[in-house]
């Protein structure tokens, strides 16, 4: 199949953009505009006057961040009614993953209705870019990113390699 290549034209920068002085001034102007607008709004609210919403700094991690309904968090593998993974090892998610961080091995399924199942299913969360393409590509809704768990940092890289057992837990144990 022929591959269509769309060249991206790099925008040309004028003299003022190349010396950056004007751009630095414009950037500072935006920063100070936000600063004084927020100061004004919060000041009015402190005085009990009506004002638009001012920006608020969330004291994370003391105050947990509220995730949006469409936020993509850690992956989970869904189960069938009998508890087995819903994944049919079609490898679509592994193929579409731009970070190449999904590794699946397929094996024959004992269930006559399904030809294959995943023998192993690993995701290297340290490489994942949380694009959600794996979720979109799955034809059987076997993988989702809806656990609302975004605190995934670890001290060792191998702790970021999530296997099928970990991915099938709704609330996983703390990783070593
Ligand atoms: S979210 Fe994106 S990068 Fe992460 S495993 Fe899925 S397809 Fe790959
Ligand atoms: S796309 Fe879905 S069914 Fe296919 S291998 Fe990935 S999780 Fe399994």
Image (spheres, grey):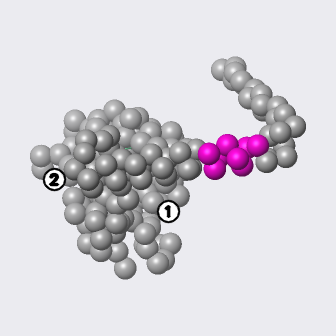
Question: Which quadrant of the figure contains the C terminus?
Answer: bottom left
Return the disc, 1 or 2, that comes first in the chain's sequence.
2
State the residue at coordinates (71%, 24%): 6
Magenta stretch, main secondary structure class? helix
| Residue stretch in magenta | 22-29
Q: Is residue 159 visible?
A: yes
Between residue 1 and residue 56, name the one nearer to us: 56
Q: Which residue sits furthest right? A: 15
The relative height of residue 126 versus residue 175 in the rendered view (above or below) is above
Q: Is residue 143 visible?
A: no
* Label 2 element class: loop
Name which quarter of the figure residue 26 lies in.
Answer: top right
Between residue 121 and residue 111, name the one nearer to us: 121
Q: Which residue sits furthest left? A: 81
Which numbered dot is residue 110?
A: none
Residue 24 part of the magenta segment: yes
Residue holding disc 1: 126
Q: CA distance from mark 1 to mark 2?
A: 28 Å
Question: Which quadrant of the figure contains the N terminus?
Answer: top right
How many neighbours does mark 2 have within 10 angstroms: few (below 14), some (14-19), or many (20 or more)? few
The relative height of residue 8 versus residue 146 in the rendered view (above or below) is above
Report x, y in % for residue 37: 45, 46
């Amino acid at each position: 199949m022929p591959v269509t290549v769309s060249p991206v034209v790099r925008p040309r920068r004028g003299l003022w953009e190349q010396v950056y002085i004007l751009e630095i001034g414009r950037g500072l102007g935006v920063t100070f505009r936000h600063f004084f607008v927020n100061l004004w709004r919060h000041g009015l609210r402190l005085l009990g006057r009506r004002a638009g919403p001012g920006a608020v700094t969330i004291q994370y991690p003391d105050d947990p961040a509220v995730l949006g309904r469409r936020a993509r968090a850690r992956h989970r593998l869904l189960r069938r009614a009998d508890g087995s993974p819903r994944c049919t090892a079609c490898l679509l998610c592994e193929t579409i993953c731009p970070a190449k961080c999904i590794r699946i091995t397929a094996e024959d399924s004992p269930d006559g209705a399904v030809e294959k199942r995943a023998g192993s299913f690993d995701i290297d969360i340290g490489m994942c870019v949380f694009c959600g393409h794996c979720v979109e590509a799955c034809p059987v809704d076997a993988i989702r990113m809806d656990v609302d768990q975004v605190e995934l940092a670890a001290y060792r890289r191998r702790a970021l390699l999530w296997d099928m057992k970990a991915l099938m837990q709704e609330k996983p144990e703390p990783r070593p």
